[in-house]
Image: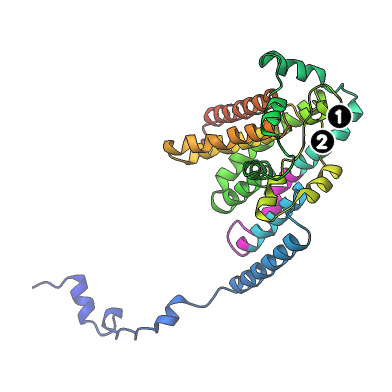
Amino acid sequence: MTLTSAGRDDLDPASPAAAPAPAPRAAADSRGPTPPFEWLRRAAAGLYLAVLGWHLVRRGVPLERAQVLAWIMVALVITTVGRPGGGARAVVKDWVPLGVVLAAYDLSRGISDTLGMPIQKESLVGLERLLFGGTVPSVWAQERLDAFTGPTRWWELPIALLYFSHFVTAFILLGVLWARRRDHFKAFRRRFLTLTAAGLATYMLLPGAPPWMASRDGLIGPIQRGPLRGFRLIGVDISGAFIRYGARFSNPVAALPSLHVGWAAIIALYLCRLSPRWAWPLLALYPLGMGVALVVAGEHYVVDVTMGMAYALVVMLGWNWWERRRAEPVR
């Protein structure tokens, strides 16, 4: 009988196969030593959560975009340090463009004032009345709901949650995509920055006053502002933080288009790429709900809301076309 290679190895005392099998290690040793960065990561994560909790209790929920970006960037550094493609350098490289565009967005009121473009007030009121038979939907809704006066009603909480989500949702999605799928992070970032830049350009060239400002100037009926009042129902009041943020950074004539709705729409449209078809109607509820909340709160006209959705759709379709043309689809 001719021995196979395996058979000769078995009979050869010098072969590895003939050597006695090593004793099994204890179950605890099978996991191996904890990587050096893991201890650092755990300690940093604990410190991060403690500082964040202190900030939420003492300073309130961060609304300024720079603060939100900073919190997310630090979290990403902690969770990816020591891993391929992670760490502070990678986070700064990918997230700085976001900070630059958003800083310009926050300073857009000053840019608009410098250009001296006329603020659209009567024209927006006239267009809204033309579309809705002489009625301004924000005034109509607030009259029937007796909105934002007296005791806080249950429906004010969904409005507050939707309104507040504008300040954090896009950045949380960007953070998750950066940590899990860098290709999708870059694809969504392109769309998000393009949409924001388009809105910024419109604000500079065509600044538009929201319904509450038109009401203050006597152009339409009374409008009560209180988009975040609903948080009182759960024992949270961030109106003070919102007022401070508005005084420092908010552009009160950045109504046309509504980037509250535009950002919500671009989030929903991009998530449709990553979700099964049955989830698409649920995702569509986000920008639609945001639009209703903004109109009821007197923060935007229906015209602003529609324009924000249109901007998002054009940006999404434009980047989809460009990626197909360059044969670089993101799946």
**Furthest-left residue in this view:** 1
Give 245 or 272, whichever is nearer the viewer.
Answer: 245
Give the label on residue 112, or none.
Answer: 1
Q: Check whether the beta carbons of the residues at disc 1 and disc 2 lie within 8 A of each other.
A: yes
Q: Is residue 195 visible?
A: no
Q: Where in the figure is residue 30, as x and y percent of width and height?
A: 42, 78
- Residue 291 in magenta stretch: no
Residue 60's quadrant in the figure?
A: bottom right
Rendered position, 10 above or below 182: below
Residues drawn in magenta: 79-99
User: Is residue 68 left or right of 240 when viewed as pictured?
Assistant: left
Give the label on residue 9, or none.
Answer: none
- Residue 97 in magenta stretch: yes
Residue 10's quadrant in the figure?
A: bottom left
Q: Is residue 43 visible?
A: yes
Q: Where in the figure is residue 15, as x and y percent of width and height?
A: 28, 80
* Residue at screen point 73% across, 16% down: 127
The way the protein has been coloured in the rendering is rainbow
Rendered position, 37 above or below 77: below
User: Is residue 126 left or right of 43 when viewed as pictured?
Assistant: right
Q: Secondary structure at mark 1?
A: helix
Q: Where in the figure is residue 248, as x and y percent of width and height?
A: 86, 44
Give 285 or 117, whichever is nearer the viewer.
Answer: 285
Q: Residues within 10 Å of mark 2 (few under 14, many from 20)?
A: some
Residue 142's quadrant in the figure?
A: top right
| Residue where numbered disc 2 is placed | 251
Q: Earlier in the sequence, mark 1 or mark 2?
A: 1
Q: Secondary structure at mark 2?
A: loop
